[in-house]
Amino acid sequence: MKNITLCLLIFFTLQTFAQSEENENGLKDLRYEDKIAKKACTYLSEMDSIADPQQAIVKCIIKAKNNVHEEDIEKKYKRDFTVEGIRGLNKKVTDLLIEKCKIVSKSE
């Protein structure tokens, strides 16, 4: 039982540390999905009016993805260009927006 507990503890510790890396300044980098969600939230907050919240969220996520790729060319994020990969990324980013972005949580 102790071995199983130790293995689980090590596994969860490694998962926690693997999610964010430190850059050369010692600051933790945001995960790919977090960067996209943060930028998408910024873009949503800059919009004057939102007639269709779902469409606005999709447009802002696409704009944010493109911006993250342009800014972090040297990072070369692992991208999954399959339909499932793109849908999975969009779902993760949307979930982060709902969780952390005040504008999205108010509009839905």
Image (cartoon, rainbow, N blue to C red):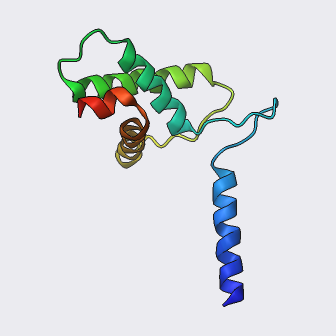
Residue 41 x, y percent position in the rendering: 42, 25
* Towards the viewer: 71 or 50: 50
Instruction: Identify the residue shown where x is 35% and y is 38%.
Output: 98
Residue 93 position within the rendered picture, expressed as x and y whole percent measured from the top left: 42, 38
Q: Quadrant of residue 53?
A: top left
Compare residues 99 and 19 and report the one nearer the observer: 99
| The quadrant where residue 26 appears | top right
> Can you say which quadrant of the picture contains the C terminus?
top left
Vertical position of residue 2 compared to residue 38: above or below:
below
Which residue: 81% across, 29% down? 25
Q: Quadrant of the N terminus?
A: bottom right
> Which residue is farthest left?
51
**How many callouts does the rendering have?**
0
Corner quadrant of residue 40: top left
* Residue, far bottom: 1
Residue drawn at point x = 66 percent, y = 81 percent: 5
Q: Is residue 28 left or right of residue 55?
A: right
Residue 12 location in percent, x, y? Answer: 63, 65
**Residue 39 drawn at (x, y percent):** 48, 24
68 left or right of 56?
right
106 relative position to 21: left or right: left
Of 84 and 17, nearer the camera is 17
In percent of the image, x 38 and y 39: which residue is there?
Answer: 90
Q: Nearer the viewer, residue 45 or 17?
A: 45
